[in-house]
Image (cartoon, grey):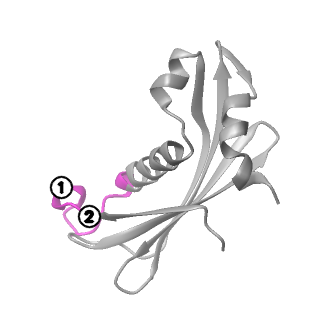
């Protein structure tokens, strides 16, 4: 798979459950942090977009847990972007850094609320254009 963005992170001890593996909810945080960094790379700021009346919100997520991450594991979070109608679809995979083992696969579908109404966003389309051209 071709990815548009990646970032490295490390599992912190408080993210693990009694079994010593990352609690499932933390993968949502990893996904969100990766998307936010990607948006910054694209020149977008959630805060600035909100001030303009444009809010990108998660409409649906699909999650697949493959191999657990453990305390102090370093991992690489990778992202690929597609668009379906007005939905931006973020395909996100997390790999353990030491051996490139796939640990998690997720898909987040985001839509934009513009001035309180579901709508497309020219700002997001413009910022994502080079990733969506194929």
Q: Is residue 95 left or right of residue 57?
A: left
Name the residue: 41% across, 48% down.
Answer: 33
Q: Is residue 122 left or right of residue 60?
A: right
Of the numbered discs in the image, which one, if any, rests on residue 52? none
Q: Quadrant of the N terminus?
A: bottom right
- Which span is picked out in magenta? 11-26
Mark 2 neighbour density, 10 Å: few (under 14) some (14–19) many (20 or more): some
- In this picture, is 40 found above or below 100? above
Task: Locate residue 50, reporting x and y percent.
Answer: 52, 20
Q: CA distance from mark 1 to mark 2?
A: 9 Å
Residue placed under numbered mark 1 in the picture: 14
Q: Secondary structure at mark 2?
A: loop
Examine the image and state in which quarter residue 58 appears.
top right
Q: Nearer the viewer, mark 1 or mark 2?
A: 2
Name the residue: 67% across, 30% down.
Answer: 123
Of the numbered discs in the image, which one, if any, rests on residue 11? 2
Q: Quadrant of the C terminus?
A: bottom right
Name the residue: 82% across, 40% down.
Answer: 85
Examine the image and state in which quarter residue 92 appears.
bottom right
In the rendered image, residue 111 lying in the magenta stretch gets the answer no
Q: Answer yes or no: do the residues labelled 1 and 2 have beta carbons within 8 Å? A: no
- The answer to whether one can see residue 37 in this image is yes
Task: Locate residue 27, reporting x and y percent.
Answer: 40, 56
- The answer to whether one can see residue 121 in this image is no
Closer to the camera in the image, 48 or 97:
48
Q: What is the chief secondary structure element of the magenta stretch? A: loop
Closer to the camera in the image, 62 or 11:
11
Q: Secondary structure at mark 1?
A: helix
In the rendered image, residue 14 lying in the magenta stretch gets the answer yes
Name the residue: 48% across, 43% down.
Answer: 40
Task: Locate residue 130, reporting x and y percent.
Answer: 72, 52
């Amino acid at each position: 798979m071709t990815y548009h963005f990646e970032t490295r992170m490390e599992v912190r001890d408080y993210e693990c459950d009694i079994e010593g593996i990352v609690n499932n909810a933390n993968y949502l945080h990893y996904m969100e942090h990766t998307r936010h960094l990607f948006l910054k790379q694209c020149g977008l700021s959630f805060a600035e977009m909100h001030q303009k009346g444009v809010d990108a919100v998660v409409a649906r997520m699909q999650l697949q847990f493959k191999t657990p991450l453990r305390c102090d594991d370093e991992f690489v979070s990778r992202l690929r972007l597609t668009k379906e109608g007005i939905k931006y679809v973020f395909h996100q995979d997390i790999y353990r850094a030491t051996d490139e083992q796939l640990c998690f696969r997720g898909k987040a579908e985001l839509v934009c609320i513009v001035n309180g109404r579901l709508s497309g966003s020219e700002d997001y389309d413009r910022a994502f254009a080079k990733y969506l051209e194929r």
